[in-house]
Structure formats: C-alpha cells, structure tokens
Image: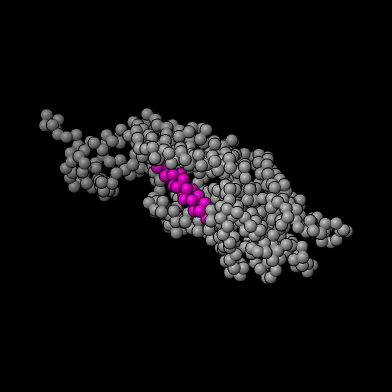
Amino acid sequence: MEDDCQPLLNSELTTEDVSHRGSTDSLDFKNKRPFHVEPRNIVDDDPQERVTAEAAILNSRVHYYGRLTGSSDRLLSPPNHVIPGPEELYIYSPLGTAFKVTSSDSTSKNPSIITIFAIWNTMMGTSILSIPWGIKQAGFTLGILILITIGLLMLYCCYIVLRSPKAIPYVDTSEWEFPDVCKYYFGKFGQWSSLVFSMVSLIGAMVVYWVLMSNFLYNTGQFIYNSAHHVNVSDSEFGTNGSDRVICPYPNTDPGGNLTLSAVVLGGGNETAGDSFERWWSKTNTIPLYLIVLLLPLLCFRSAAFFARFTFLGTISVIYLISLVTIKAFRLGFHLEFHWFHSTQFFVPEFRLIFPQLTGVLTLAFFIHNCIITLMKSNRNQENNVRDLSVAYLLVGVTYLYVGVLIFAAFPSPPLSKDCIEPNFLDNFSSSDVMVFVARGFLLFQMITVYPLLGYLVRVQVMGQIFGNHYPSFFHVLSLNILIVASGVLMAKFYPNIGSIIRFSGATCGLALVFVFPALVHMISLKRQGALRWPSAMFHSFLIVLGVANLLAQFFM
C-alpha cells in the first residue's frame, strides 16, 4: 500500500542513479528538443498538408514521456541516439502542420553591403542603355520626375513581394517564392500566370540581348575592318567633328528603321571591297544569323555553372559605362534649353505626351520582383531586409539618373537635335571611337556569358512545370532553344529597336508581377486579418489601374 502511494517515478535520484544517466543528465533541462516527424510521415510536399496520424501519435508519446516526472527531472527524456540530425528535424505545430527546421548557420550568409550590391548588379541590365532615350521621349523635366516616382512605386511593390510569404499564418513559407504565394491566394491560375509573366520578362531580356549582341558584334567588326584598311567613316556619318564625335544615325529616317545613312547617301555605283564587306557584315541581315552558330550550342548545356563564373563582368561593364559617360560629359559640356510644351529645331519640350514609353522602360529597369525573395534569403541580418532593399533601389535610381541626365544634357545640340538620341545611346558614338569600342567589347562578352544563364532559367521553369524535369531530353531542350533564338533573330532583323522591346516586355511582365498580384495579395492578406481600410484599398486599387494603363499606353505611342 505504501508503494502505491508513491509517485510513478521518484524525482530524488541517488548517486548510483545519476551515474547511470550518462551524458543525458549533462543536458540543460531548459533546452527543448524539437519534435521529429519522419519525412515519410508527411502526407505530401505541400506544406499546407497535415501530418499523418502516426506522426501525431509519436508526438503524443514524446509529450507523455515529458510529463511522467517533475519539470526538473529528465529521467525519461528521449535518448540522444534517437534524436535525428538537423537536416531531418521538423517541428510539429498544434494546428497539425510539420515545419522543417532550417539551419541557423550564418557562415554562408552575406553582410548587408554584399546583399545591396548583389541587388544593384542584378537590376543593372541592358535598360541602362535606354534610359537617356526614355528621358528624351518624356521630356527632360518630366522624365526625371517619372524616374523618381516609378522607382518609389517599384520599391513599394517589391517590399510587398518580399513580405508576402511572412503574412501567411500557420504555414511554413521559408522555402517559398512569389509564385508559391500566388498559388496560395489564387490557386493554379496564380501559379501559372505568374510563371507566364516571369517568362515574358526573361524572354524579353533574351531578345534584347540578341539585338544588342548583333549591334555590338557589328560595330566591333566595323572598327577592326576600318582600322585594318584605314577607312575614314566621318564622311558617311552625320555628326559633330572633333575627337569626341557624336553622330545622328538616322537624321532623315525613323529611328526604328533599318536604313543606314551611308546607304541613303552613297547608294548606287559599282560594288567595291567595302560594299562587299557591308553585304556580308550587316547589322540586320547577317550578324543575327552568325550568332546562332555560337549561342545555340551554349544554350543546350545541361548546366549553367560555367557561365555563372562570369557574372562579375556585369559589375565591370556598368562601372566602365559610368566612367565613359562621365568622361564624355566632361569633354562635351552641357547643352540645355528649356521649352516647356513646344519643341524647337534642336530641343524637345520638357513635358511630352509620349512619356509612357519611359514608364514601360523603367518597369523593366527596376524589375527584380521575381527573384527578390531568393536574393534576400542570403542576407545575414534578416531584420535589415527592408533597409537593404531600399538602399539598393536608391543606388539603382541614382545610377539611372546619373547616366540618363548626363547623356541627355551633354548631347551636342546644336548642331544635332536631342531627338537624335538613340534607344542604345552607344549608337550615338562613331564606330571608330576607341573608348566606345572597349565598352562594346565588354558588353558583348558579358552578354555572351549571361545569355545562356537566362536560357537556363527559362528552361528550368518551363520544363520543370510541364515535364517535372529540368532536362527531359536533348530534343525537348533543343526545340525550346530554337524558339527562343528564332524570336531574337527575327526581332534583330525586322525591328532592332531595343527601347520599344524593353518597354513592351517591361509593361507586360510588370502588369502582373509588379502591380496586380502584389496589390491583390496585400489587400487579401489585410482583409483576412480584418485590417483593410478604405485608404489602403483605394491606393492598391490605383496600383492595379496604373499597371493596366501602363501596358495599354504602349500600344498608342
């Protein structure tokens, strides 16, 4: 009877008892062991699925062991050898969800300064070449105001995307990307539509790359040919004189056209060696086809790890471009006159009705929304994510303003009109310019290495969604790559205007991934929390209307 009145387990341990505890007693009793759910006990990979009854029973058993003794007695704590490794740990939520424990090792994380420049380097793409043209299309004053405004709106929408996984309760979203968030709120439609619009941005960038690579390869070959044969091209170019020569490639034709001034002025007569070279070395007729021999095999590589080693060239190219712009502006000086609503022979008005062309370009120039969550996961101090994102956008905006304002202001008017500023501002410098030749060479090599990376991203997302395999077969991959390359060749031949390509692709992908989905996700999240108020609803509805208007306006410009 006396034994029946004693507790099931006595909390007073003898010395012998303690000696039998081994290493278990050396553990701090305040150190809570996570509940382990075997991966095979999870119903599905979807983190919204509830764990099985077997896992729930195991959870109850572990809690039962913990309640057998007093809070300070660890006699029946689970032995060390049954506790799995960190990569196999899951936390069991009272709501029935299994959360995987992620490693807290910060050695692989980056400090804030690295994260900021990673965002800056990722966002600094080919759009920087079209910023001066975009400012010209909007007008100098209005262009600066639009650049600042669009930058702030893009930053806010990117902030919504970054915070969106954390706003989902009771679900482990540590490995989610924004398409997963769209799937959570909008189902399969959200997942597939976000994928489609993400593809628009990637394929649009690849088309722009093909046009620019054709341009840079053409001018590089032209520079080498002219230097080898001592050809002076100044007589066939309409532009200024001097060492820092600025040209107007299309003084009498549509800037989107394909005719060169030499063809207009010098047409006719017998074919010379130079004419033969021009026939086989044409920016629109032959160069886009030559690139197929080089780039199509590279796109078929199973892995893109080799090309990822050259991403540092992007930073070098941007730094060299900024240096080039600074030197050219210093040598050319500023040429500005302010005419608010009416154009003159050499100057454009400060406010122009075709300003949506700039908003389309800026939507792609500030676009990083489809990968910002991934980039921020590597940030060592997660509490600084918003600050680091804001600083990165500030750096990007300042870079765009610096290049756009200096090129526009330094463009020599008179004798040239500001309307001569090209969608690729490097086209306003002669092919014989050594500094510009170096810039084109840097950019050409960089794009040759980045182009397969973009193709790899397209392949992974398309093939992964359709076939469940990133490389289903060589035939599948080759077919996809042929379609991508064909789109670039056709645009480089028939419409090599990178400004228009950038603005259309930017406005299209921005409609869903910048304005519509982030605004809807934010409003739905607030509504479920009971925190949605009419000022917030009106502002985010305005963002949706702005995205739709931005896309529609591109067709009327």
Q: Position of residue 482 (x, y in %)?
A: 69, 43
In this view of the protein, which residue sits in the foreground, 95 or 128? 128
Residue 555 in magenta? no
Q: Residue at x 49, y 39 (%)?
A: 544
In this view of the protein, which residue sits in the foreground, 61 or 82? 61
The single residue placed furthest to the right in the displayed view is 270
Q: Is residue 26 left or right of residue 47?
A: left
Residue 157 in magenta? yes
Q: Quadrant of residue 266?
A: bottom right
Q: Residue at x 68, y 42 (%)?
A: 483
Question: In the rendered image, is residue 100 in sight?
Answer: no
In this view of the protein, which residue sits in the foreground, 83 or 306? 306
Q: Is residue 442 above or below residue 484?
A: below
* Image quarter of the C terminus: top right
Q: Position of residue 245 (x, y in %)?
A: 68, 66
Q: Quadrant of residue 283?
A: bottom right
Q: Is residue 375 left or right of residue 456?
A: left
Instruction: Write the start and end of the magenta stretch as one range.
Output: 143-172
Q: Position of residue 70 (x, y in %)?
A: 20, 39
In this view of the protein, which residue sits in the foreground, 12 or 307? 307
Colour logic = one colour
Q: Quadrant of residue 429?
A: bottom right
Q: Residue at x 58, y 42 (%)?
A: 553
Question: In the rendered image, is residue 540 in sight?
Answer: yes
Q: Majority secondary structure of the magenta segment? A: helix
Q: Position of residue 350 (x, y in %)?
A: 56, 55
* Image quarter of the N terminus: top left
